[in-house]
Structures are given as C-alpha cells and as structure tokens.
Image (cartoon, coloured by chain):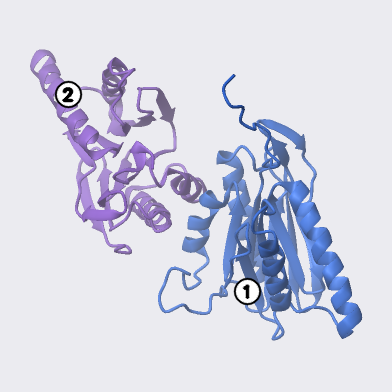
Chain colours: A blue, B purple
C-alpha cells in the first residue's frame, strides 16, 4: 500500500476584502460582510471588523475561526492592559501587540490578514498592515483579502498620498477629506464586487475621528 | 513559477465612443531579470485592427508571425482586410489547433468593425473567446488591471479622455506587479487616425 498523505487541512479561506485609509484627522476602516467557503456563501451578514480600543479598529480577512480566536486574545490582553495601566491602549501600541501575538504562532499561524486602523496620540489617522505571521508596517492606506489586488492599484492612483513605493519613505496620510475618502472606499468595494466572487453583499465602514466613531453600511451586489 | 509568468506582461484594451485604445507595458524579463525595456507586445494587423499578446514572449512572436501570414493570404484572396470579429475567430481556431500542446499566450484583440464600431475581445491560451463591451485585460498584472479598469472606466469616452483613463489604469496596475512595467505603449485608434504614444512610468 503506497504511503498515505494527510489530506485534511486545519485551515479554510472564508474570503472577503478589508480596506483602511488614514487621513489627517480621521481613519476609515471597511470590510465586506460576505463569508464564503469554496464556491458557497455561508452568510451575507458577517462582520469582519472589531473595535479593540477606543482608538483602534481591526479588520481581518482570511480564516474567520482564526480571526475570532485572534480577536478574543487581543481583547483579553487589552483588558489586562487597562487594569494594569489605568488607560486605553494607543493604536501604535495595539499594532505592536498584534504583531507579537501573530508571531507567537509563527509555526502554526493564524490564517488572518489584518489591517489595523485608528488615531495615534496626536489625533492623526494611522493604518497598520500585516501579513499572517506578524510582519507589519505603518502606511497611509492598505487593502487585504481576496479583492486586495484589485483595489490597491486604484488606491495608489486616487489617494494622492505619497506612494509607499517611493524612496525615501514619506508620511503617507492622504490629503483627502473624510467625505471624499468614504466615497472612494465605496467605489473600491463596488468595483471589487464586480470582479471578485468572494466580495459582495454589504460593506461595513467604521470612521474614527476626534468626535468618536461612526458606522455606515452600504449594499453591494449579491451575486 | 508558471510558464505564463516567465517573461511578464500587462495588456489592456478599452472601448470608447467610436474609438478604442490598446495598451501594454514594455518590459521583457527572464523571471526576475529584466532583459529589455522597449519590448513590443502590441502588433498591427491592419490600420483598424491590433492584437496584443501576453504570456511567453517566444510564443507571442511566433503566433504573431503565423497570424500575419494568414491575414496576408486572406487579403490576397478576398482583396480586403479582415473584420475584427473574423480575425478573433481565426486566432481562436489557430490556438485550438494546438489544444494539447498550446501556445502559452493570451491574446487581446481590438479593432474597428463595420461602420467603425469598436470591437474588443480576449481569449485564454486555447482559444476560448471572451467578448466584452467595456474593457479586456491580460498578463501577469491582470488582477490589478481588472480592479483599476473597473473603477476608472466610463462608457462612451472620447479619444483624449479614453487615452488618459487607459494610461492611468495601466500605470497604476503595473506599478504593483514586479514582472511588468518600464513604461507603457498606448495605441489610440479612431476611424480617421492611429496615435501611438509611449508612457513614462516607474522604471523598475
């Protein structure tokens, strides 16, 4: 009998796309609400976004079971931080925590592709983008997930941010206004929905600014 | 690395109001090494018909030679140029002949048909045609091109605006693909003239 190979995988890809854009005094974090497996849709109404602290919001695509577990770990660690330091974690601090949490499972990773958005201690928008094992970078904007390759070049073109591909690296927040950035996010998702089968149903957008946090939902194509 | 990604390419064609544009990048590479920065991927069949060939460069050149040969014979026999729809069927047939040992190319065909109506189409490496009314893309940067074109395209653009749109879509897409780039080559075709322009982009 020939040697049997394992054909069970602990991972699955539930699809979906996440986008975050940092502005001078705001941050937009958006994700679609479709959850799929293979060619089937599991649900049209699943949130991939979680508010980890009052100025940190994370959106994650990939394997949602791992995303859920990751969210639980981060929420618990934030609670401990609050007990020990009597304050909320800042967004850059949360960014480092997320990186360390992901690398902790370097040899059996969380299959999660994250973008963390929020406001830094000066009130400026910040976006951090990650790979599955915790390599991260502060950027002006980022897309992750199945629609990322469709959305990213369009964002490069429209955001008028200094491109992250430029050298020397420039501070990357977009000069666009909050309304313009939100419109751009809606356009991105509408276009990605047309060409990516795993993106669609609805897009959920969270906007953080000095006044607090606001949630907006837009319908997308359901096919 | 897949055989389709050996040389690197980015191709896009878009329909406008009584005109079309077809654009490509200019890089020829051997995996990650760049060999040429002025490599032509779009070929003229006749003054109202162009074909761009993405994929393996040697197959693209051979396929182009075969297609030009077939068109020249057609022209001698029929005493006229081939319509774009007919040419697309010819390309499809030539590719399917090699069904079990294919040319590793993805063609993008663009032309003005009867009454100067714009026609674009693409096909896979064994000749499955995909007709589109708005735009078609091919090459290693195709996913990025889909995203950029889908967001930037509007129907019935005039020639100048079409040129701007296709150029922006091409440049932003190839900037996110390591295997394509080194500028762009855009052909803008209207019933009266053909304009060829070179774009300067990131030279990496």
At x 21%, y 36%, the residue is B58
At x 89%, y 84%, the residue is A86
* Crowd around label 2: few <14 · some 14–19 · many ≥20 (10 Å): some
The answer to whether B150 is drawn above or below residue B51 in the figure is below
Q: Position of residue A218 (x, y in %)?
A: 73, 50
Quarter of the image for residue A28 reads bottom right
Quarter of the image for residue A104 reads bottom right
Picture quarter with the C terminus of chain B: bottom left
Q: Report the mark closest to the observer, 1 or 2.
A: 1
Separation (CA) of disc 1 from disc 2 = 55 Å
Question: Dot 1 corresponds to which residue?
Answer: A23
Q: Position of residue B17 (x, y in %)?
A: 37, 40
Q: Can residue B197 be seen in the rendering of this structure?
A: yes
Q: Secondary structure at mark 2?
A: loop
Q: Can residue B16 be seen in the rendering of this structure?
A: no
At x 83%, y 79%, the residue is A88
What chain does mark 2 sit on?
B
At x 73%, y 63%, the residue is A58
Q: Nearer the viewer, residue B6 or A124?
A: B6
The answer to whether A145 is drawn above or below residue A12 in the figure is below
């Amino acid at each position: 009998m020939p040697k049997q190979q394992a054909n069970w995988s602990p991972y699955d890809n539930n699809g979906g796309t996440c986008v975050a854009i940092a502005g001078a005094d705001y941050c937009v974090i958006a994700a679609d609400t479709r959850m799929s497996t293979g060619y089937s849709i599991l649900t049209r109404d699943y949130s991939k976004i979680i508010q980890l602290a009052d100025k940190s919001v994370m959106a994650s695509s990939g394997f949602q079971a791992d995303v859920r577990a990751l969210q639980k770990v981060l929420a618990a660690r934030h609670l401990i931080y609050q007990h020990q330091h009597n304050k909320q974690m800042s967004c850059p601090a949360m960014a480092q925590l997320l990186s360390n949490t992901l690398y902790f499972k370097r040899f059996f990773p969380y299959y999660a592709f994250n973008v963390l958005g929020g406001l830094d201690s000066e009130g400026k928008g910040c976006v951090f983008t990650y790979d599955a094992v915790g390599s991260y970078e502060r950027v002006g904007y980022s897309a992750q997930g199945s629609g990322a390759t469709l959305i990213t070049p369009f964002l490069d073109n429209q955001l008028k941010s200094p491109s992250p591909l430029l050298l020397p690296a420039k501070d990357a927040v977009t000069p666009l206004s909050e309304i313009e950035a939100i419109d751009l996010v809606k356009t991105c998702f509408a276009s990605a929905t047309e060409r990516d089968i795993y993106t669609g149903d609805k897009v959920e957008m969270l906007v953080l600014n000095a006044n607090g946090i606001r949630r907006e939902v837009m319908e997308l194509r359901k096919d | 690395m897949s055989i389709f990604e050996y040389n690197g390419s980015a191709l896009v064609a878009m329909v406008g109001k009584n005109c079309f544009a077809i654009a490509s990048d200019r890089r020829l590479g051997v995996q990650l090494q760049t060999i040429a920065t002025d490599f032509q991927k779009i070929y003229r069949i006749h003054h109202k018909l162009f074909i761009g060939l993405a994929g393996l460069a040697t197959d693209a050149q051979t396929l182009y030679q075969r297609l030009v040969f077939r068109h020249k014979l057609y022209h001698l026999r029929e005493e006229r140029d081939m319509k774009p729809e007919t040419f697309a069927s010819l390309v499809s047939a030539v590719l399917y002949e090699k069904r079990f040992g294919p040319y590793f190319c993805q063609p993008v065909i663009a032309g003005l048909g009867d009454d100067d109506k714009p026609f674009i189409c693409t096909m896979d490496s064994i000749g499955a045609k995909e007709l589109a009314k708005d735009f078609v893309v091919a090459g290693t940067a195709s996913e990025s091109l889909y995203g950029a074109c889908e967001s930037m395209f509007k129907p019935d653009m005039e020639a100048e605006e079409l040129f701007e749109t296709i150029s922006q879509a091409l440049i932003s897409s190839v900037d996110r693909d390591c295997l394509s780039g080194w500028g762009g080559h855009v052909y803008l075709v209207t019933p009266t003239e053909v304009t060829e322009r070179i774009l300067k982009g990131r030279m990496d």
